[in-house]
Image: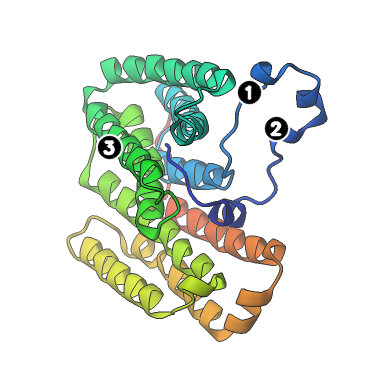
């Protein structure tokens, strides 16, 4: 789905994507012809990882799943021109208006097609709109990189999970909502580790509180049978990561960001693998 995350968070989750704005090929084109790309490219891993967990929960992959993935990707691409134009609203940027419009109209058309097939998706769309509005308000109040807005950003992007499930199956379930919550809690946990590298946010207390409350929420979802035991235990990856960070705190704060990026990305991939596999049946249904 959508909405932005601070640059450090993005690199931590997906440090190896090239910036198309800086490619040699792009420089040969007129400025307005260059497609815009999400400035914080780490959100791609969050988006595709969340989508994969939702598709795994649906236990099938069909044409509607493909359309939902493209729709989610296009919606994510709207974020960068949207935020840039809000920041520079007094001086319109044709490039961002053009490409934001292309991405937005394309995503809207696909969303409409999916909505006719699965009317329940209107709930997901409404939450995405809320996420956009919240992000826009944060930009206008210069709180775009605040912890609260980054968590809202993760929650919005993680809507890719129930989108995949709803588009594939035609309905939403309590389990799909629980996977969305689980993904949001896991990916948002990275906010509190990355922030430890900054002088103004070096306190461990917020992270300890967050991980404790998140663990209780996951236990609650398991206790009411919205998450299986293995799926719930996948959140332990976040707890283990936070524990390791506490043990090597000096290294974590002083290491080059390249190594922190690899560190964060590996834990994210382990979580996605466990969460996705845990919701699959022993044998996939035929067809």
Q: Which mark is residue 175?
A: none
Q: Residue 132 or 116: which is nearer the viewer? A: 132
Residue 33 vertical placement versus 48 (above, below): above
Q: Quick one: quadrant of the C terminus?
A: top left
Q: Which residue position holds label 3?
A: 130
Q: Which residue position holds label 1?
A: 35
Q: Which residue position holds label 2?
A: 20
The residue drawn where x is 70% and y is 32% is 20
SS under mark 1: loop
Q: Residue 267 or 284: which is nearer the viewer? A: 267
The residue drawn where x is 38% and y is 63% is 230
- The image shows residue 268 at horizontal and vertical percentages of 53, 58
35 sits left or right of 182 in the view: right
Q: Residue 80 or 57: which is nearer the viewer? A: 80
In the figure, residue 189 lies in which quadrant? bottom left
- The image shows residue 55 at horizontal and vertical percentages of 41, 38
Q: Which of the two labelled residues, at mark 1 and mark 3, occupies the earlier sequence position?
A: 1
* Badge 2 density bin: few <14, some 14–19, many ≥20, Cα 10 Å: some
> Marks 2/1: CA distance?
8 Å
> Marks 2/3: CA distance?
29 Å
- The image shows residue 158 at horizontal and vertical percentages of 39, 45
* Badge 3 density bin: few <14, some 14–19, many ≥20, Cα 10 Å: some
Q: Are marks 2 and 1 in contact (CB under 8 Å)?
A: yes
């Amino acid at each position: 789905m959508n909405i932005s995350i601070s640059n450090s968070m993005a690199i931590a989750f997906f440090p190896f994507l090239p910036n198309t704005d800086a490619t040699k090929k792009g420089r040969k084109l007129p400025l307005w012809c260059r497609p815009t790309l999400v400035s914080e490219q780490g959100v791609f891993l969050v988006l595709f990882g969340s989508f994969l967990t939702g598709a795994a929960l649906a236990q099938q992959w069909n044409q509607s799943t493909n359309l939902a993935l493209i729709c989610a990707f296009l919606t994510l691409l709207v974020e960068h021109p949207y935020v840039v134009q809000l920041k520079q609203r007094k001086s319109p940027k044709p490039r961002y208006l053009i490409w934001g419009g292309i991405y937005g109209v394309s995503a809207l058309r696909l969303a409409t097609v999916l909505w006719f097939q699965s009317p329940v998706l209107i709930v997901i769309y409404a939450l995405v709109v809320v996420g956009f509005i919240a992000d826009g308000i944060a930009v206008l109040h210069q709180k775009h990189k605040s912890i609260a807005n980054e968590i809202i950003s993760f929650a919005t992007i993680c809507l890719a999970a129930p989108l995949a499930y709803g588009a594939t199956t035609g309905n939403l379930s309590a389990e799909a909502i629980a996977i969305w919550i689980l993904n949001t809690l896991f990916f948002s946990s990275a906010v509190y580790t990355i922030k430890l590298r900054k002088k103004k946010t070096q306190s461990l207390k917020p992270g300890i509180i967050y991980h404790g409350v998140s663990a209780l929420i996951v236990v609650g979802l398991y206790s009411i049978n919205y998450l299986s035991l293995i799926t719930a235990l996948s959140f332990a990856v976040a707890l283990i990561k936070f524990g390791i960070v506490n043990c090597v705190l000096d290294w974590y704060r002083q290491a080059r960001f390249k190594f922190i990026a690899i560190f964060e990305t590996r834990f994210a991939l382990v979580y996605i693998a466990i969460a996705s596999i845990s919701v699959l049946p022993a044998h996939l249904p035929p067809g």
